[in-house]
């Protein structure tokens, strides 16, 4: 008889990158939540449903009734802005965002799943002289979870040509299960930028004389076809190792931060599909045709590298089931 699938709830689900990774490792998603309308639309296009509400409302209304009674793991890539170097470093003081971790803790205390998986920016570890990280550890411990955390890079742990360091935290109620859990090892990087690029990117992605101020700067800086560049407001960053710099949520804003390349036809930014490939999303993943690229870039930058998640999820499943 086939083994019963482990059940997960997908909080701060975004467009479902975490979900795809856990599903690939054999988990079943019992509930998902995100309050971003555009991300929820993309999620709905690819999966069955999503509770499109503020998580605080979802757990306050009628005493957490929307959250399933039984599930095995809580998945939560809680919002990283309060902790990222780019943000204001306000951490837990950032009401309604930093504090979302406490919503997660409340759910853990009420439902007591076997495990919890959290993802965040690398900087979380050092934020506020490591006080934030210690607080998270203590909060989890108070809820009954022992955790391991590790910073993994998508290019060394997910076989995608994107430099992306993130902290992954995995907690279990059982110390024995925690002992059995290992983060995935490094793996060779075989995928290249050339393998990610679309053959016929649309005209709209190319820079021309139309961009009076930017274009001359780009022509001067974006010289090599084996490099990926990023325009950071006032200067151009060249990534010397031939991989793509970290895709960020701010890619959507005014076109800044979207990685730039030179190809046979000219200088252009990466397309949303190419960015999705750099996050290891499958080709079968759909994006709503009605949404502007700005929304899609933001959703992809906000998401996760699917193969890294899938490898962690596989090890979580093995630890629970062995
Ligand atoms: C870093 S992204 C998570 C990405 C997601 N795990 C994925 O795989 O694509 C954080 C998400 O949290 C959502 N979010 C932030 N505050 C929220 C709240 N109060 N209630 C529900 N969702 C919220 C944002 O809309 C965003 O999609």
Image (cartoon, rainbow, N blue to C red):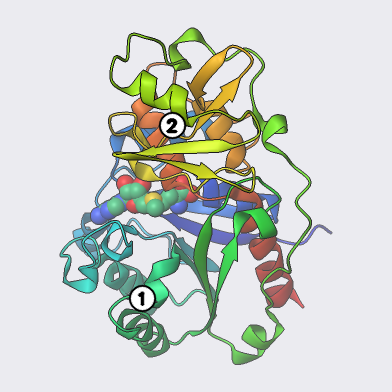
| Mark nearer the viewer, 2 or 1 | 2
In front here: 48 or 210?
A: 210
- Residue 167 visible in the current orientation: yes
Q: For mark 2, what is the residue? A: 42
Whichever of callouts 2 and 1 sits on the residue coming sooner in the sequence is 2
Q: Residue at image x 34%, y 34%?
A: 256
In front here: 30 or 307?
A: 307
Percent across and percent down for residue 150 are 56, 74
Q: Tell me if residue 273 comes above or below residue 52 in the rendering.
A: above
Q: Tell me if residue 42 comes above or below residue 11 in the rendering.
A: above
Q: Residue at image x 29%, y 39%?
A: 234
Query: Is residue 90 toward the left or the right of residue 31 in the image?
Result: left
Q: CA distance from mark 2 to mark 1?
A: 30 Å
Asked whether the beta carbons under mark 2 and mark 1 sit within 8 Å of each other, the answer is: no
Q: Residue at image x 38%, y 16%?
A: 290
Query: Is residue 239 toward the left or the right of residue 236 in the image?
Result: right
Image quadrant in which the N terminus is located: bottom right
Image quadrant in which the C terminus is located: bottom right
Q: For mark 1, what is the residue? A: 110
- Residue 14 visible in the current orientation: no
Query: Is residue 271 toward the left or the right of residue 175 in the image?
Result: left
Q: Residue at image x 66%, y 90%?
A: 176
């Amino acid at each position: 008889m086939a083994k019963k699938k482990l059940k997960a709830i997908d909080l701060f689900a975004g467009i479902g990158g975490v979900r795809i990774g856990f599903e690939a490792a054999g988990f079943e998603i019992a509930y998902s939540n995100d309050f971003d309308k555009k991300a929820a639309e993309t999620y709905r296009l690819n999966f069955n449903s999503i509770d499109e509400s503020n998580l605080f409302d979802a757990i306050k209304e009628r005493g957490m009734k929307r959250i399933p009674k039984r599930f095995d793991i809580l998945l939560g890539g809680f919002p990283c802005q309060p902790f990222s170097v780019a943000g204001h470093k306000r951490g837990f003081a950032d009401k309604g965002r930093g504090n979302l971790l406490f919503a997660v803790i409340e759910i853990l205390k009420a439902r007591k799943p076997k495990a919890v998986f959290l993802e965040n920016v690398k900087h979380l570890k050092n934020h506020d002289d490591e006080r934030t990280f210690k607080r998270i550890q203590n909060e989890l411990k108070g809820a009954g979870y022992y955790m391991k955390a590790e910073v993994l890079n998508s290019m060394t742990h997910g076989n995608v040509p994107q430099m992306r360091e993130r902290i992954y935290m995995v907690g279990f109620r059982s110390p024995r299960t925690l002992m059995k859990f290992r983060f995935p090892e490094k793996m060779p990087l075989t995928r290249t930028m050339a393998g990610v690029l679309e053959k016929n990117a649309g005209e709209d992605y190319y820079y021309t004389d139309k961009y009076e101020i930017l274009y001359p700067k780009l022509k001067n800086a974006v010289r090599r076809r084996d490099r990926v560049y990023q325009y950071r407001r006032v200067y151009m960053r060249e990534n010397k190792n031939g991989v793509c710099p970290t895709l960020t949520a701010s890619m959507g804003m005014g076109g800044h931060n979207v990685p730039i390349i030179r190809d046979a036809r000219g200088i252009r930014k990466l397309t949303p599909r190419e960015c999705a490939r750099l996050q290891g999303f499958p080709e079968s993943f759909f994006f709503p045709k009605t949404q502007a690229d700005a929304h899609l870039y933001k959703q992809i930058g906000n998401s996760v590298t699917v193969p890294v998640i899938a490898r962690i999820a596989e090890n979580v499943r093995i630890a629970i089931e062995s």
